[in-house]
Amino acid sequence: MRTDRDSSNTLPLNVFGAPGCAPSYSIRDFLHRSDIPFNWTELKNDQEAKEKVGAASLHDDKLPVVFFPDGTRFNRPTIRQITEKLGWFHSPNRSEYDLAIYGAGPAGLSAAVYGASEGLKTVLIERNAIGGQAGTSSRIENYLGFPDGISGAQLAERARNQAIKFGAEILIAREGVSAEFVTGKGVGTLADGTKIVARATICSTGINYRKLNLPREDEFFGQGLYYGAGSSEAVLCDGEHVVVVGGGNSAGQAALNFLKYAKHVTIVVRGDALKDTLSQYLVDRVTSSPNMTVMTNTSVIGLSGGRTLECIEIRNDRTKQTQQIPTKWLFACIGGAPRTEWAEQVGIVRDSDGYLVTGPDLPRDLRRDGRWPLDRSPYYLETNMPGVFAAGDVRHGSVKRCASAVGEGAMAVAFVHRFLANG
């Protein structure tokens, strides 16, 4: 099976791999979210693997194989190797920045655009693909100015180009692992030891997808079980039964996208009804779609299969009845949790779920117990560390919508200016 994505300016990459291969999925997901055109060829047996890419079998460690337009071949490349070949992997150009932004979802991209366009020396650091979770969405239809909708990958690519146009520096496949703060400066340490020094910092790292917490879950990841909307996989589900777990907008959008290709789509929801968590326009489409089943008050309680997922077990939480559903495609869209362990290490206040607390939501006794050193109160999006701001889904009390994340990114830059001018 082959998928083609066209581009007027870029020749596609060619990716060859085995069905149900986790490394192949990671590469497809990265390329799709980065809006890079590629052809995917699924090798169906050992003979095809040998003839097409010289692999000994479908289980050869060479797979997946990626061919670039210039003929360069990579056997089982890492995402970093791909970004290096694309010319996207860079070291910092400056020894110090006015603003460092961690996380290139909608909030981080917005902050980069506004920071750079307003003259701040700005660097944006992203550990995976530009766009964050929004980048996995097949179509965002309720974003202002796009009445016909736009894919998350396309929106992210436009924002990336806009930020670069204004002079923002973007570091891809670079993950921040620790931080320290001294008077007037923050120092972030990346996984490879690189230091990012900046006068102000915006954390917009979003959230990680929440797991189902089931036996064999890690074993099946990328081999039948996927987290998020799975827009890179939709065309591969032709004629299949797809199961989507979750009742939020991302789950509804994913289910409708899969329905273009799949034989049937089942949505599994723990709540009483979709309307409790899903925008009305999506509820209307889901409930009126043929070949779509919604199972409320239901949970996934088991996963089974050989090398890849073959079947799931569900349970009605009211009747306690269980049921087996044969499927090779399970997508979990059940929210997530923030990656903010670094914040705890430096004394930044988090709520009980790990989200960064900012502005008026911070405890009022911060100054008395030594967790806020200035005479003024923290700015609206500022943490209890002066000059460190939070925007988007990582922030306590944020509205989990693309438009609100973009707004918070822009607003955070306004407070950064105030901090840099007045402290």
Image: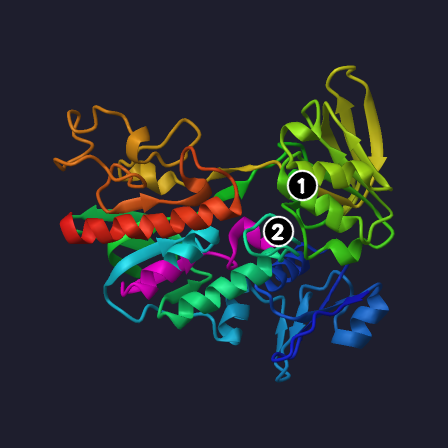
For numbered disc 2, what is the local secondary structure?
loop
The furthest residue to the top: 319
- Looking at the rendered structure, the kind of residue marked 1 is Ala
Quadrant (top left, top right, bottom left, bottom right) of the N terminus: bottom right
Identify the residue at horizontal 21%, vertical 43% (top origin). Answer: 386
- Residue 44 in the image: state x and y as whole percent: 84, 63
Nearest the eye: 371 or 25:
371
- Residue 374 in the image: state x and y as whole percent: 14, 37
Which span is picked out in magenta?
Answer: 113-136
- Looking at the rendered structure, the kind of residue marked 2 is Ile
Identify the residue at horizontal 52%, vertical 65% (top origin). Answer: 158
Residue indicated by mark 2: 140
- Residue 338 in the image: state x and y as whole percent: 46, 39
Residue 90 in view: no
Q: CA distance from mark 1 to mark 2?
A: 12 Å
Residue 325 in view: yes
Nearest the eye: 246 or 323:
246
